Amino acid sequence: MGAHEGTTLAHRLRAHFGDADHLYASLLAGMADDWEVGGVTREVFEGWEDAPPQQLPQLRLLAGLFRIVLRGDAPQLEGYYPALGGDLDHHEAWAAVRPVLAAHVEELHEALRDAPQTNEPARSVALLVGLSEAIARTGLRRVRLLEPGASGGLGLLVDRYRFVGDGWAAGPDDSPLVVEGCGAAGFEPVAFDVVDRRGCDVAPVDLSSEAGRAYLTSFVWPWQVDRHARLAAAIEVARAHPVVVDRAPASQWVAERLAGPAEPGVLTVVWHSVTRLYWPADETAAMQAAVDEARSRMPVAHVALEHDWSSAGGGVDPGLPSIELDGEVLGVGDHHGPPVRLS
């Protein structure tokens, strides 16, 4: 039995998508059945049976499987992946997937070490909301942007994307990435100038490499073709305007970045999205302490799009993520960013 409300891993696999009808729901149902009879799924997940729900080992495995498909080592599965042009019935996919799991047990077990890095660029609409409010409160329009848990750095390019919401729009008209359906009725975006931007991650993704681009792609659910198009457009922006993502843990890096003197008239914004669930509690506390310590020396704003896992108990559904500015909830976003509902 697992450690979470007496449920087994099989129960948690089935519960992740519930009654949803898509490829991954079908595969997790197949994996659950296979785990219960001692099949290859049990071997792949060995040691992860009691992982905390927020570690999402099932999504790590599915991404590892997608990477095998992306590199062409499982051509028999491509037809089940709409992002690759597939249109086969996903209800029949498990029978084709199980032999692939058996052929790649070691690789897929290692894939469980890799925390999901969707690096969803549309989540930066939350940064736009938080940033606009911080600028309105401080009057400072010149911004230094810092992102711990930045992955490939796509969340640092908020001013290079175009956002379209309910009665408002922001960003360059000619951006390769246009994020539609942002909601946030009544929102008034504020003009700003990013004078410096930098990120960190314990495992940065190099978007200049084919392997790095495929790695990020593998975490985007394959039937969400629009999200794949968004990612491709954001990568195009990033390749034209590369950002630096240092290899470092969040709290150490934030403390070091905030230790030096700030340029006068510049608002430092520490921003992260859907990363806190992967950080140990002491890491989150240390990063927050670094931000708080810097407030006496420079204008600092802390913007986040994060789920409240503390209210999820032992379950797997933490609800929708909140948009936070210095701990104040400004609204609610969707798991992948838009639409936004302001408080």
Image (cartoon, grey):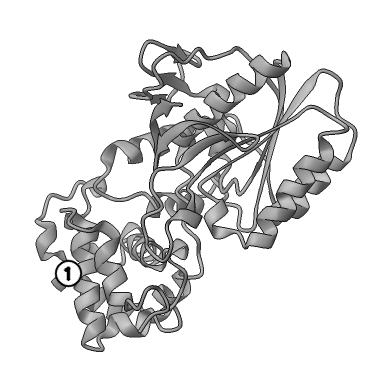
Residue shown at 75% from the left, 24% from the top: 267
Locate residue 328: give its quadrant.
top right
Q: Nearer the viewer, residue 204 or 134?
A: 134
> Height in image: 190 above or below 107?
above
Crowd around label 1: few <14 · some 14–19 · many ≥20 (10 Å): some
Q: Nearer the viewer, residue 252 or 220?
A: 252
Rendering coords of residue 162 (x, y %): 45, 20
Left or right: where 302 falls relative to 34: right
Give me the residue at 45% from left, 70% from top: 112
Residue at x 42% of width, y 80% of height: 106
The local secondary structure at tag 1 comes to helix
Q: Nearer the viewer, residue 239 or 251?
A: 251
Query: Can residue 335 be seen from the camera position used here?
Result: yes
Looking at the image, how many numbered discs can be counted on the residues?
A: 1
Q: Quadrant of the rendered structure where residue 69 is?
A: bottom left
Residue 37 vs 251, above or below: the answer is below
Along the horizontal axis of the image, is 117 left or right of 1?
right
Residue 291: percent from the left, percent from the top? 76, 41
- Residue type of the residue flagged with mark 1: Trp
Residue 78 appears in the figure = no
In this figure, which residue is indicated by the disc labeled 1?
A: 94
Q: Residue at x 31, y 67 (%)?
A: 73
Residue 236 x/y as whole percent: 47, 33
94 relative to 199 in the view: left or right: left
The residue lying toward the viewer, choosing from 5 and 284, is: 5
190 over 160 or under it: above or below? above
Q: Position of residue 49 (x, y in %)?
A: 40, 79
